[in-house]
Image (tube, rainbow, N blue to C red):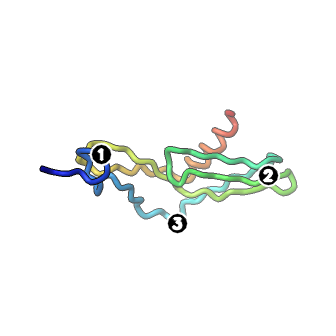
Amino acid sequence: MAVQVGGFPGMSSHLTRTIRAPVNPMDKSTVFSIFPKPIKDTKLTISPGRFELAAGTYDKPSLLIVGPSSWWKHVDENQPILEIPQSSVQIAESIVRDWANR
């Protein structure tokens, strides 16, 4: 008789780990803000997915250096989770677009 120790039945725990591929150290983007209140944005489906900008002014804008993030796609029970990398430009654009559409 087989006994399942932790996890979900049928799922191999070594296949469901998320391991990030090496990140390009040159992939950086900058987001500037002149909004007088802090901006906090959390994207639950990517990692890293938490972004915070301090309050800024026209004379002294705040800035945030954004790097690349990744999300993972679960293809099959017997396949490892597939990493889908997103460039810093895509992440910075998403931060600005999501804030502007609130």
Which kind of residue does numbered mark 3 sit on?
Pro
Of marks 1 and 3, the one in the foreground: 1
Q: Position of residue 1 (x, y in %)?
A: 12, 50
Label 1 Cα crowd, 10 Å radius (few <14 / some 14-19 / many 20+): few
Which kind of residue does numbered mark 1 sit on?
Phe
- Which numbered marker is on residue 8? 1
The residue drawn where x is 30% and y is 45% is: 8
Name the residue at the bottom extreme. Answer: 25
**Numbered disc total:** 3
Give SS at disc 1: loop
Which kind of residue does numbered mark 2 sit on?
Ala
Of marks 1 and 2, the one in the foreground: 1
The residue drawn where x is 59% and y is 43% is: 94
Q: Earlier in the sequence, mark 2 or mark 3?
A: 3
The residue drawn where x is 56% and y is 50% is: 49
The residue drawn where x is 77% and y is 56% is: 62
The quarter of the displayed image where residue 28 is located: bottom right
> Foreground: 86 or 53?
53
Label 3 Cα crowd, 10 Å radius (few <14 / some 14-19 / many 20+): few
From the image, tell me which residue sits under label 2: 55
> Foreground: 70 or 10?
10
From the image, tell me which residue sits under label 3: 25
Give SS at disc 2: loop
Give SS at disc 3: loop
